[in-house]
Amino acid sequence: MVHKLPRYSAKRVRRERKILYEIEGRCYPGVTTVLSATKPREARDALQRWRQRVGVDAAQQISGKASSAGTRLHKQIAAYLNDEIVEIPADLTGYWESVQPVLTEIDEVLLVEGAVWHEAGFIGFPDALVVMKGELYLCDWKTALRPKQPQWLCDYFLQIAAYRQAAIQVYADFGLEVQKGLIAIALADQPAQLFEVAAAEMEEHWQEFEQRLWKFERRRLRQ
């Protein structure tokens, strides 16, 4: 069993009007940057239709509220996993109660929000590497105002697959084997949605991410 892992940090830098992360003398784009820049047209069109349907101002307000809740919830989950003081404000109580049953199942915490990077040319910051039910899970915490359909989560699956490959590479000397991925989507008024992803599935998603990374690099070189 792998025990507590060393935690690495990356420096956020700006290069040619782009945000990158510098670690060990090299700069990398983030996984979420790669996925955002290469989002399929149908996904971009669906997002645009939603903005038009609810109105631009309302869309910004909804997105801002969700983003704020997600950032603050992440901070408290990280504190919980690091055995630090947890302070849940009133407007996050529902989200916390939604995801807390998942947190109580964790038997061992190996890493919380550490940088992992890959020679293919990207960096990521997985929310946690933990042991649950005797297996090593790579976890990603999300928040949502309402439940999400699995078909909407393609990029979430690619994200954890990329994190997994990077973590395996960074911690190769530890013999790291990530058996499962877990996307936990906290909701304000009901139990969190849980999407477990087996290692074989993450391998397939990794191949998809590699294609998106290739597209990202092609676009970058054209600019």
Image (tube, rainbow, N blue to C red):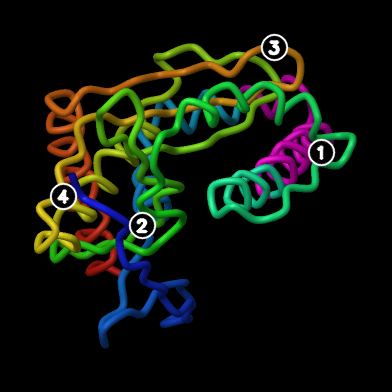
Determine contact: label 1, label 3, CB under 8 Å.
Answer: no
Q: Earlier in the sequence, mark 4 or mark 1?
A: 1
How many discs appear? 4
Amino acid tagged 1: Gln
Q: Secondary structure at mark 3?
A: loop
Which residue is located at x 54 percent, y 47 percent? 81
Q: Residue 124 shows which numbered tag? A: 2
Q: Secondary structure at mark 1?
A: helix
Queried whether the magenta region covers residue 113, the answer comes back as no
Q: Earlier in the sequence, mark 1 or mark 3?
A: 1
Amino acid tagged 3: Gln
Question: 169 left or right of 189?
Answer: left
Query: Which of pointers 2 and 3 indicates the residue nearer the eye?
Result: 3
The residue beneath circle 4 is: 176
Q: Position of residue 139 (x, y in %)?
A: 40, 37
The residue beneath circle 3 is: 190
The residue beneath circle 1 is: 61
